[in-house]
Image (tube, grey):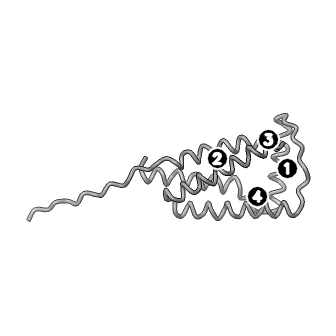
Amino acid sequence: MTPESYAKIVRAGAIYDIVATAALAIPPMAYIVLQIVQWLDLQLGFGTEFLPVDPTSMFFLNLAGCFVIVWAVAKLRNPTPEMGRLDALLRFALVALQLWNVAQGATPILLGIAAVLLIIGILELRQPAPELPRATPVTSS
């Protein structure tokens, strides 16, 4: 994989993160996202119990949304292998949290999100080929 294609993977992950979480940074939008997840859970027949979200929990949801957006912008601006590796680590931590929460009774919809995070994280762990030094043209005098 070339460094350019690796940077595209990191940028694509950042764009996914912004699209998937931007609404969570805004309280009224976060409520709508949670209602959509609850509706989808019902339509898929999971029957997960959703508790009302209190203001403190909403604050932490919004805070996480803000952090994800800032981190995604950093990756868009600097899609280096170091950023990709750190992002992969974060994605794997989030997958572990999603699996734990589903085991505790959270909606299985989280497993779909975990699959996307896992795929992006694995791609970000791939090693880009080192850049070869460019040949200097030989000139004859």
Looking at the image, residue 18 sits to the left or right of residue 74; the answer is right
Q: Position of residue 132 (x, y in %)?
A: 32, 54
Q: In the drawing, does residue 102 fall left or right of residue 117?
A: right
- Nearer the observer, 32 or 108: 108
Q: In 3D space, how far apart are the residues under numbered discs 2 and 3 (Cα atoms)? A: 18 Å
Q: Which mark is residue 35?
A: 1
State which tag comes first along the sequence, 2 or 3: 3
Q: Nearer the viewer, mark 1 or mark 2?
A: 2
Q: Which residue is mark 3?
A: 103
Nearer the observer, disc 2 or disc 3? 3
For mark 4, what is the residue? 24
Q: Is the residue marked by circle 3 packed among few (<14), some (14-19), or many (20+) residues within 10 Å?
A: few
Q: Residues within 10 Å of mark 2 (few under 14, many from 20)?
A: many
Using a 10 Å C-alpha cutoff, classify the residue at mark 4 as few (fewer than 14 neighbours), some (14 to 19) or many (20 or more).
many
**Of discs 3 and 1, which sits in the foreground?**
3
Q: Nearer the viewer, mark 2 or mark 4?
A: 2
Q: CA distance from mark 4 to mark 3?
A: 23 Å
Q: Nearer the viewer, residue 100 or 127?
A: 100
Which quadrant is the C terminus positioned in?
bottom left
| Labels 1 and 2: the sequence-earlier one | 1
What residue is drawn where x is 84% and y is 60%? 57
> Residue placed at 85% from the left, 45% from the top?
38
Q: What SS does tag 2 mark?
A: helix
In the rendered image, the residue lying farthest to the top is: 45
Residue 95 locus on image (x, y percent): 68, 47
Mark 3: which amino acid? Ala
C-alpha separation, residue under disc 1 versus residue under disc 2 = 22 Å
For the residues marked 2 and 4, what is the alpha-carbon distance in whole angstroms?
17 Å
Mark linked to residue 117: 2
